[in-house]
Image: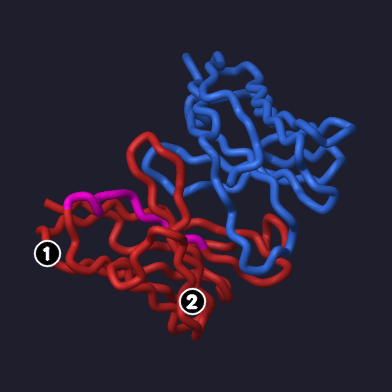
Amino acid sequence: DAKTTQPPSMDCAEGRAANLPCNHSTISGNEYVYWYRQIHSQGPQYIIHGLKNNETNEMASLIITEDRKSSTLILPHATLRDTAVYYCIVRVLNSGNTPLVFGKGTRLSVIA
Amino acid sequence: GAVVSQHPSRVICKSGTSVKIECRSLDFQATTMFWYRQFPKQSLMLMATSNEGSKATYEQGVEKDKFLINHASLTLSTLTVTSAHPEDSSFYICSARGARGLAGGMYEQYFGPGTRLTVT
């Protein structure tokens, strides 16, 4: 079962920052927060993950609250190609055969 | 690095026939492969988990005799939909988990581009 809650949809103007929230109030101490996205008719794409510190890579930034009960994925300058469903997933790192379990995600629409 | 391919990308078959979908890890050895199914406007649903050389573990409600999974090598897994019916029409996505040290973190899952199956 997915252990996260995300808004079903969001809109963002092209060029603006997209801030996608995720609630994971039951996260365990050894669970990481992962973000994937799925562009229409494609396989999911890894974006970023973190434990408790904020993380940044070439795609996005991940802000995790101090109590780790929620996080925000930030796409600093959204483009039309960022239109996708974004999934927030919590899981233990190096969890062997445990697969990623996908919730319903947030459908982000970037508007010109 | 960490590329997963699927073949075919799209297939149409007649009801009652079988269809095989291949999933390959191109630049790493996949100790574990996962198969997901996705119906329109729904999320990915895990079908089964397979380790190289072992029998697959199927999720509840997934018929193992209908969805045959073979993971004969560290770079190839196949999903065969036997006696396909229109309700099997879906987007099938494989995912491979590699070894420590790959881009994106240790033991991450990398996804194939998906195969759209249409059963007429």
Name the disc covering residue B101, or none. Answer: none
Which residues, given as a range, are shown in magenta?
Answer: B86-95
On the image, the x and y values in percent for residue A20 come to: 65, 26
Q: Chain of mark 1?
A: B
Query: Which amino acid is tagged 2?
Result: Thr
Residue at coordinates 68% horizontally, 30% vertically from top-left? A22
How crowded pointer 1 is (Cα within 10 Å; few <14, some 14-19, many 20+) is rated as some
- Secondary structure type for disc 2: loop
* Residue B18 on image: x %, y %: 19, 68
State the residue position of label 1.
Answer: B16
To which residue does mark 2 refer? B75
Using the image, determine if residue A89 lies above or below residue B77: above
What's the chain of the residue with tag 2?
Answer: B
Residue at image coords 72%, 36%: A24
Please give the letter of the chain rendered in red.
Answer: B
Chain with colour blue in the figure: A
